[in-house]
Image: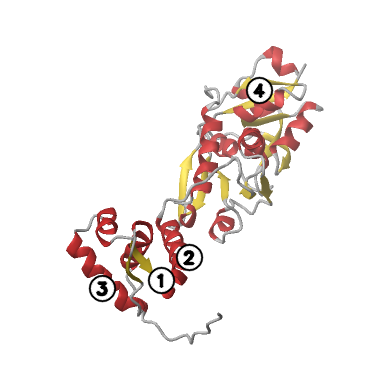
Amino acid sequence: MKVIANMRQVDLSAVDLNLLKLFEALVRERSVTQAGLRLGLSQPAASRALGRLRNMLGDRLVVRGKLGLELTPRGEALVGPVARLLDDARGLVAPAIFDPASATGRITIAAHDHLSLVVLAGLVARLERQAPALSLHIAQPAGDNVRLVEQGLVDLALGIFADLPGSLYRRGLYTDRYVCIARAGHPCVAAGLGLERYVSLRHVAVTISGLGESAVDTALSALGLTRRVALRVPHFIAGAMLVADSDMMLTLPSHLARRLADKLPIVLLDLPLQVAPLAPAMIWHERFQGDPAHAWVRQQLVDVVAAFEPAG
């Protein structure tokens, strides 16, 4: 028999999910007393709740039978929908669970070439082992990348950040120092690198925009000194490759320099100048603060840099 019922307006403020939990217990126990015990209710309290449930749903729902309570046709029809509704409600309030092994999708991170090489290589290795179906996308940099995070265009940004909007979170990753690199066989390698020699050599300077002074130039200026900048480039890796094939010098973060020295014919030299250390950080928007998947990715980055050797 097919029954077509007319839908009527329902005041959701009058719907009590706790009464639906009683209905679920009645279906399982077929006893008001036992259903009440399942929910921590006394027998009188369970009976009163059943009365409210019947009033809310407009049906007796259960009646006495030979083997206990039996469901009315309306009660039978509600068993499935009520179970699904309560499962959905429990899912809404239960803590979200993230399983990296089965996770899919894409993580988008904004970072310039320096941090892409130093930090993200380790992150890729972790994703391959623990979350193979997650893909990683490095976004096109936009200045300091703060705008990309604010506008939701990336999940995370890595870099050196000054003041941030109140909607963004920051976590420091590690501390690094500057060193110099020169090609293998450069005269300064044997002769030593004092401050006077350092400023007299031809340098590659790296700035994010390709213009303006770097941290090294600022530190030299405070001493009343300038260096011979022969070339300005926006990328450390390009600068290092040029240094490997010339007599120019490049000053760059030590973690990056060590990694490049494994691939290029260059040597590392101590910088004969006090420059404020680098403190790269990651930033993210407050809407991701409580997201378990996002928190897992952030923790992977923290674990990657925890394995770094001291920069001293």
Looking at marks 1 and 3 on the same chain, the residue that comes earlier in the sequence is marked by 3
Residue 197 marker:
4
The answer to whether mark 3 and mark 4 are in CB contact below 8 A is no
Q: Which residue is mark 3?
A: 51
Q: Residue furthest top?
A: 190
Q: Hey, which quadrant is residue 151 in on the image?
A: bottom right
Residue 80 tag number:
2
Q: Amino acid at mark 2?
A: Gly
Residue drawn at 65 percent across, 15 percent down: 192
* Residue 68 position in % (x across, y down): 32, 61
73 over 158 or under it: above or below: below
Label 4 Cα crowd, 10 Å radius (few <14 / some 14-19 / many 20+): few
Report, in whole angstroms, how far the alpha carbon at label 1 lies from the one at label 4.
91 Å
Q: Give the residue number, with chain letter if any, for mark 1.
A: 75
Outermost residue toward the right in this view: 245
| Separation of marks 3 and 4 at Cα, in angstroms | 93 Å
Q: Are marks 1 and 2 in contact (CB under 8 Å)?
A: no
Contact between labelled residues 4 and 1, with CB atoms less than 8 Å apart: no
Q: Between 149 and 86, which is closer to the camera in this rendering? A: 86
Q: Secondary structure at mark 1?
A: helix
Sequence-first tag of 3 and 4: 3
Q: Amino acid at mark 3?
A: Gly
- Who's the residue at 62% across and 23% down the image? 196
- Amino acid identity at mark 1: Gly
**Is the residue under label 3 in contact with that under label 1 (CB below 8 Å)?**
no
Element marked by disc 4: helix
Residue 265 placement (x, y as % from top left):
77, 21
**Secondary element type, mark 2:** helix
